[in-house]
Image (spheres, grey):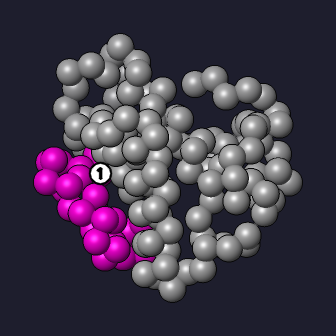
């Protein structure tokens, strides 16, 4: 288990996590706060609250709506990215499936997840050409470098 420096903790209370999730749902989360850690936190919340299909649908819809609220088009070149969304949901799901996570607080889970998940992790599984293709943005693409095993 990673050791955290106090400054590395993004969240100090459940209320801070709920504030991010509520702002995401209300489409009021500022674009500069919709960062990698916020994406992971939202994925974590939805996977804890809903079964897989429900979590995926809510995250997908929420990202699209938040992008639109920020004036960002969801197209084959910008906005929502299906493969990255599913990749990170699978990563968070695997993280939650670990036995060491049972009984841990939401704050602890969210902080460790944000600290342990490098933003460029998908590039260990996908070539840039595939990952950033319009096809991978529009629909799930299987990795072309190595199988997803978290």
127 horizontally vs 35: left or right: right
| Residue in view at x 67 percent, y 43 percent | 122
Q: Which residue is mark 1?
A: 10
| Farthest bottom residue in view | 71
Q: Position of residue 137 (x, y in %)?
A: 70, 59
* Quadrant including the N terminus: top left
| Residue in view at x 28 percent, y 58 percent | 21
Q: Position of residue 128 (x, y in %)?
A: 81, 52
Q: Position of residue 36 (x, y in %)?
A: 48, 55
Is residue 63 placed above or below 74 in the rendered structure?
A: above
| Residue in view at x 22 percent, y 40 percent | 107
**Nearer the observer, 101 or 89:** 89
| Residue in view at x 62 percent, y 54 percent | 82
Examine the structure image and report whether residue 22 is included in the region drawn in magenta: yes
Q: Which residues are magenta?
A: 9-35
Secondary structure beneath label 1:
loop
**Nearer the observer, 68 or 108:** 68
């Amino acid at each position: 288990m990673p050791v955290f420096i106090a400054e590395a903790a993004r969240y100090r209370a459940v209320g801070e996590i709920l504030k991010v999730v509520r702002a995401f749902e209300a489409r009021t989360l500022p674009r500069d706060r919709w960062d990698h850690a916020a994406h992971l936190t939202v994925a974590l919340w939805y996977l804890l609250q809903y079964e897989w299909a429900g979590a995926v649908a809510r995250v997908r819809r929420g990202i699209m709506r938040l992008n639109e609220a920020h004036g960002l088009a969801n197209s084959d070149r910008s906005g929502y990215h299906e493969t990255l969304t599913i990749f990170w949901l699978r990563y968070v799901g695997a993280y939650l499936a670990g036995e060491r996570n049972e009984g841990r607080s939401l704050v602890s889970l969210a902080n460790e997840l944000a600290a342990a998940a490098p933003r460029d992790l998908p590039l260990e599984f996908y070539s840039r050409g595939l990952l950033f293709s319009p096809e991978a943005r529009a629909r799930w693409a299987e990795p072309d470098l190595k199988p997803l095993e978290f």
